[in-house]
Image (cartoon, rainbow, N blue to C red):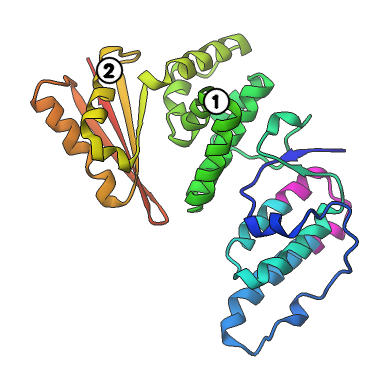
Amino acid sequence: MLIISHFALPSILLGIGSPMGSKKKEENIEGQIDTKSPGNTQVIMGIILISSIVNDVLSGNPNPEQIAIAMDQILYYAEALPKDWKKKAYYLFSRLWDRKRVFISTRPELGDNIYGESFDDTRIEKLYRVLPQKEAALLVLGNTFSKMLKRGLHHQYKEQKEETEAKYGSWGAKIVNLVTTGDIQYMLDELGDNYSKDTALKKFNEWVDNYQDISILVSPSDFEQEKAIRNRIITAATNLKKSFLLLHVSGTYRDVTKLVPLVEDMERNDLLNYSDLIPSLSKSGFCHSLKIELKFD
């Protein structure tokens, strides 16, 4: 039985070779580590934890969901291991992979079922249950990318996001951004608690189709051409689809703090006429994210 999951795979794990059908002899990984070396303490804990996860799953009769969750944990912890030990983590990973009940992809719509996926927000999960397969799959990707950002895996997120946009175009990118920015909460507020599948899909498509006029994502490099940012904001405000406009920027603290003064300067020069400016700053690892909600009465 094939299932599908999706993870930010460490490149070294992929580079070693496909474990599918592997007949490699099982190794006592922990026994090969110099336990007397102080510098290996964290490595030992990581390897032992990964080994424990594998053994727990293989000791019973796990269903595909348990295998997928175990793989997710392995790949997460493997990220923290030194390069020399990632290969040893791979051999442990392959013991699960050899069960041949899981395939990994950034195209979750390919599988009949998606296992090991959890939503922190019950409203998003409810929406996921009623959307068509492709829309639901992209919602899952957005949810996974959100988890990656919370873990501080910004480089992996960027790579996976670029791959998603290459496969699904701007339509897929807008769905992913809708989730990762948290803007989906505004859509869910409009949708309410009681809705049919048709109502949910109609509202969902409305937001995706008009997302570029509802929310603007600013890159730190965009500040080299502030006029372009101003024009994007003016265009969206002129074609206002809601009673608000959302602005997002992520980067260093210095990067993100440039956006509020720029918007306030636009208001002082009568280029923008909003009733309220509500900023919200968050941090993940070394990356800061700023969201600005501009209200228009």
Residue type highlighted by circle 1: Gly
Residue in view at x 24 percent, y 40 percent: 224
Quarter-of-image position of residue 190: top left
Of the residues tagged 1 and 2, which is closer to the observer? 1
Tell me the element at label 2: helix
In contact (CB < 8 Å): disc 1 and disc 2: no
Q: Residue furthest left?
A: 269
Magenta stretch prevailing secondary structure = helix
Q: Is residue 58 left or right of residue 93?
A: right
Which residue range is magenta in the image?
55-69
Q: Earlier in the sequence, mark 1 or mark 2?
A: 1
Q: Is residue 198 left or right of residue 231?
A: right
Was residue 63 drawn as part of the magenta stretch in this picture?
Answer: yes
Report crowding for label 1: few under 14, some 14 to 19, many 20 or more residues within 10 A (C-alpha).
few
Q: Nearer the viewer, residue 243 or 219?
A: 219
Residue type highlighted by circle 2: Thr
The residue that label 1 is drawn on is: 169
Residue in view at x 87 percent, y 58 percent: 22
The residue that label 2 is drawn on is: 235
Q: Position of residue 27 (x, y in %)?
A: 83, 73
Q: Nearer the viewer, residue 228 or 137?
A: 228
Q: Is residue 3 left or right of residue 127?
A: right
Quarter holding the N terminus? top right
Was residue 159 drawn as part of the magenta stretch in this picture?
Answer: no
Q: Which mark is residue 33?
A: none
Q: Position of residue 289 (x, y in %)?
A: 35, 44
So how many labels did they put on this image? 2
Tell me the element at label 1: helix
Q: Nearer the viewer, residue 258 or 44?
A: 258
